Image (spheres, rainbow, N blue to C red):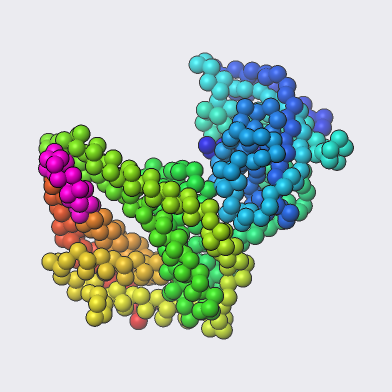
């Protein structure tokens, strides 16, 4: 569940304004009974969770007393997950959710926070709670001793729109509340040590004239951040958009990082990069099985509904999907097992270390604009020219077997990742090439997905030779997929000409 809230610092004598005078018509303010909340936060000895903007707490009196909060994409927005559990035994599931941040280190009580809360709910005519305002008097305790106190106002969005939070912010700040950076209670309670930099170093901004090493470091940090940021969402089976999944994004993080380490090979120490690439390949492979099942299930639904005038046997489609669902569950179980392993925790440790101190060669000291084009030219020329085993993209035979198209797709993905890694630095034609290559990859990806799907539908039918409805349905599905293959092949030459034009690629020569 996503939680969106804003916090405001106030003095002890702050007087809450009359909210009834500022809320929209039809909204009423309901004063709730005051409550006392006692929360114990767990963390590592070096406060890895707090420094990363993560919390794991037990709060007395809550129906679900154990809660994990994880950072999301926007300030003040967090993923919140609550579970049952005994006070001194955090649920295994929640401990797993913070693995990317704790890296398996022992979690122990870090701070005890007692809050006397006076809450106000903003409700509409249908009695929906649009927002909640909490006036919190906070004590940081050490047993029975009060170490410090502070007061703050929290405004949490419920079923209302973001504009309601803006209205409330205007009223609160006019009354003397101070809006600022979003700082959770336990972080304030723990003090400066909890506000220190996280172990996972973010990509940040590049200098005006970056070295090649600056670009490598940023690429590594970006890739690791993407991978580990989706770890909890994979465990939660959480979507990350209308048409995307955490498994997909975590797998892409693995693949891009492996590709970047390969592209920047002369700039990184081989003895450091190779073990990382090997372990990323292991993880990407496990995620790939789950992702493939996701793609096939989504494709089955889409392909089955592609021709409303020629509907397929719905029961047969459901039986095909049941086979895919079983594969999907087995693949997700394998993902869970991998993410719970010591091997994965060791990889997380190595990835975090990589963001702090990527091991570079002397060549990485050279200016980025002098070094990077030559490095990107390697995967680019492999894509364009091919070799004894793989066709070049320009020479790809429209009637070639699917496998040869797939081989070009693999080279295309490597070239695209390489161009993406430098486009933000080199700009101009590099950025244009990255955009054009994305369209080429979309076509090659559609081609591969359709080809694999066609084979899958027929293979499922072969497993049940006595089910004639499934056989007929699988055959019709396969024909639709082969039509998609032909469409992708016919569109490819034009997309490739746009991507490989001299204006976009001269910088690689």
Which residue lies most toward the bottom here? Answer: 362
Query: Which residue corresponds to the image point at 55% horizontal and 70% vertical from the top-left?
Result: 217
Picture quarter with the C terminus: bottom left
Task: Reply above or below: 295 against 491.
Answer: above
Query: Which residue corresponds to the image point at 33% horizontal and 47% vertical from the top-left?
Result: 327
Query: Which residue corresponds to the image point at 45% horizontal and 60% vertical from the top-left?
Result: 283
Q: Is residue 170 visible?
A: no
Task: Reply above or below: 191 against 213.
Answer: above
Which residue lies most toward the right here? Answer: 145
Q: State the image coordinates of residue 507 (x, y, percent, origin top left).
A: 37, 77
Q: State the image coordinates of residue 60 (x, y, percent, origin top left).
A: 70, 30
From the viewer's perspective, tell me whether residue 84 is left or right of residue 242.
right
Q: State the image coordinates of residue 499 (x, y, percent, origin top left).
A: 29, 68
Q: Is residue 15 visible?
A: yes
Q: State the image coordinates of residue 31 (x, y, percent, origin top left).
A: 67, 18
From the viewer's perspective, tell me whether residue 408 is left or right of residue 199.
left
Decide which of 508, 25 is in the foreground and name it: 508
Residues in magenta, as a range: 453-473
Q: Main secondary structure of the magenta part?
A: helix
Give yes or no for residue 470 being in the magenta stretch: yes
- Residue 436: name its quadrant: bottom left
Decide which of 289, 499 is in the foreground and name it: 289
Give yes or no for residue 275 being in the magenta stretch: no
Query: Which residue corresponds to the image point at 22% horizontal and 66% vertical from the top-left?
Result: 403
């Amino acid at each position: 569940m996503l939680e969106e809230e804003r916090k405001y610092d106030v003095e002890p004598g702050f007087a809450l304004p009359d909210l009834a005078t500022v809320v929209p018509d039809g909204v009423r303010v309901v004063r709730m009974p005051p409550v006392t909340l006692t929360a114990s936060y767990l963390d590592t000895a070096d406060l890895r969770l707090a420094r990363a903007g993560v919390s794991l707490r037990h709060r007395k009196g809550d129906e679900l007393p154990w809660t994990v909060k994880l950072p999301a994409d926007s300030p003040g927005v967090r993923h919140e997950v609550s579970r049952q559990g005994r006070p001194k035994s955090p649920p295994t599931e929640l401990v797993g959710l913070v693995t990317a941040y704790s890296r398996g280190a022992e979690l122990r009580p870090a701070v005890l926070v007692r809050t006397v809360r006076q809450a106000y709910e903003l409700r509409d005519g249908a009695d929906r709670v649009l927002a909640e305002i909490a006036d919190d008097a906070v004590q940081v305790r050490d047993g029975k001793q009060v170490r410090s106190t502070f007061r703050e106002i929290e405004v949490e969005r419920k079923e209302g729109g973001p504009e309601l939070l803006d209205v409330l912010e205007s009223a609160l700040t006019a009354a003397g509340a101070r809006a600022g950076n979003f700082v959770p209670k336990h972080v304030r309670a723990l003090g400066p040590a909890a506000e220190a930099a996280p172990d996972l170093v973010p990509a940040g901004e590049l200098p005006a004239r970056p070295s090649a090493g600056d670009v490598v470091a940023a690429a590594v940090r970006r890739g690791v951040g993407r991978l580990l940021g989706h770890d909890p969402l994979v465990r939660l089976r959480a979507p990350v958009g209308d048409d995307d999944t955490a498994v997909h994004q975590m797998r892409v993080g693995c693949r891009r990082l492996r590709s970047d380490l390969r592209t920047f090979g002369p700039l990184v120490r081989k003895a450091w990069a190779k073990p990382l690439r090997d372990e990323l390949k292991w993880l990407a492979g496990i995620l790939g099985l789950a992702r493939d099942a996701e793609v096939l299930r989504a494709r089955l639904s889409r392909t089955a509904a592609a021709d409303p005038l020629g509907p397929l046997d719905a029961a047969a489609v459901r039986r095909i999907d049941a086979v895919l669902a079983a594969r999907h569950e087995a693949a997700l179980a394998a993902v869970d097992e991998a993410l719970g392993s010591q091997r994965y925790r060791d990889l997380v440790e190595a990835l975090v270390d990589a963001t702090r101190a990527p091991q570079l060669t002397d060549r990485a000291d050279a200016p980025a604009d002098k070094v990077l084009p030559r490095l990107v030219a390697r995967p680019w020329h492999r894509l364009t020219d091919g070799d004894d085993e793989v066709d070049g993209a320009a020479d790809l035979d429209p009637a070639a077997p699917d496998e040869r198209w797939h081989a070009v797709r693999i080279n295309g993905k490597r070239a695209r990742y390489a161009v993406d890694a430098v486009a933000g630095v080199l700009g101009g034609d590099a950025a244009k090439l990255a955009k054009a290559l994305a369209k080429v990859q979309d076509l090659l990806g559609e081609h591969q997905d359709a080809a694999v799907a066609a084979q899958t539908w027929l293979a499922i039918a072969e497993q049940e030779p006595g089910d004639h409805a499934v056989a007929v349905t699988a055959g019709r599905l396969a024909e639709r997929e082969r039509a998609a293959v032909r469409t992708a092949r016919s569109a490819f030459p034009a997309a490739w000409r746009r991507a490989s034009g001299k204006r976009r690629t001269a910088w690689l020569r």
